[in-house]
Image (tube, grey):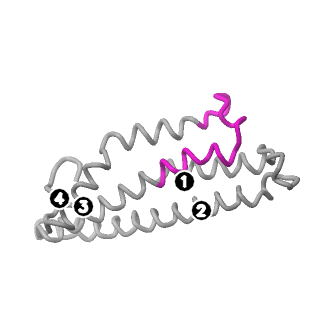
Amino acid sequence: MGIALGAFEAAGRYTREQTRPWLTAGVERATEDPYLLHRYGSLWVDLEAARGLVDRATEILQDAWEEQWDLTAEKRGRCAVAIAVAKVAATRVGLEVVNQMFEVMGARATSSSYGFDRYWRNLRTFTLHDPVDYKIRDLGNWIVNEKFPEPNFYS
């Protein structure tokens, strides 16, 4: 979530300070463009939803951690499910933010002098260490077959 939120904040700052309005937008400033505002609003909704899932998973993990040696397989499984859901949501939203940030900032923002590409690169590197396809498979197995994810290094 941190990379996505950082990218979102950087894009907002750049948009306010640098972005020019599209020539057919009919506005004087890019910050008045209704399509740009719609895109920022939509991304914010997605970020807040993912943040809520991450907060929920954090609370469930803390509860499980406090169980220590009394942690049951059921509670551990529910914790793994909550974490998988948060991981998938955060990855999806993060990738959407780091891709859409260039849409809202404009072509000049792709210049390497700004370094905005680091958000995409850092997020991809981080997310590829624990591929979401396996989390989604685990979630599907839990939903269809009522089997919690097997404990492993990443769950």
Q: How far from the left and from the top, in percent, is residue 85?
A: 33, 61
Q: Quadrant of residue 148?
A: bottom left
- Label 4 sits on what residue type? Pro
Secondary structure of the residue carrying numbered label 4: loop
31 to the left or right of 5: right
Disc 3 from disc 1: Cα separation: 26 Å
Which of labels 1 and 2 is toward the front? 2
- Label 2 sits on what residue type? Ser
- Label 1 sits on what residue type? Leu
14 to the left or right of 3: right
Q: Earlier along the polypeptide chain: callout 4 or callout 1? A: 1
Q: Is residue 18 above or below residue 141?
A: above
Q: Earlier along the polypeptide chain: callout 3 or callout 1? A: 1
Q: Which mark is residue 149?
A: 4
122 and 30: which is toward the camera: 30
Residue denoted by label 2: 42
Disc 3 from disc 4: Cα separation: 8 Å
Q: Earlier along the polypeptide chain: callout 2 or callout 4? A: 2
- Assess disc 1: are there few (<14), some (14-19) or many (≥20) residues with their C-alpha within 10 Å of its C-alpha: some
Secondary structure of the residue carrying numbered label 1: helix
Residue denoted by label 1: 5
Disc 2 from disc 4: Cα separation: 32 Å
8 and 28: which is toward the camera: 28
Disc 1 from disc 2: Cα separation: 14 Å
| Residue interval drawn in magenta | 93-116
- Label 3 sits on what residue type? Leu
47 and 56: which is toward the camera: 47
Q: How far from the left and from the top, in percent, is residue 53?
A: 40, 66
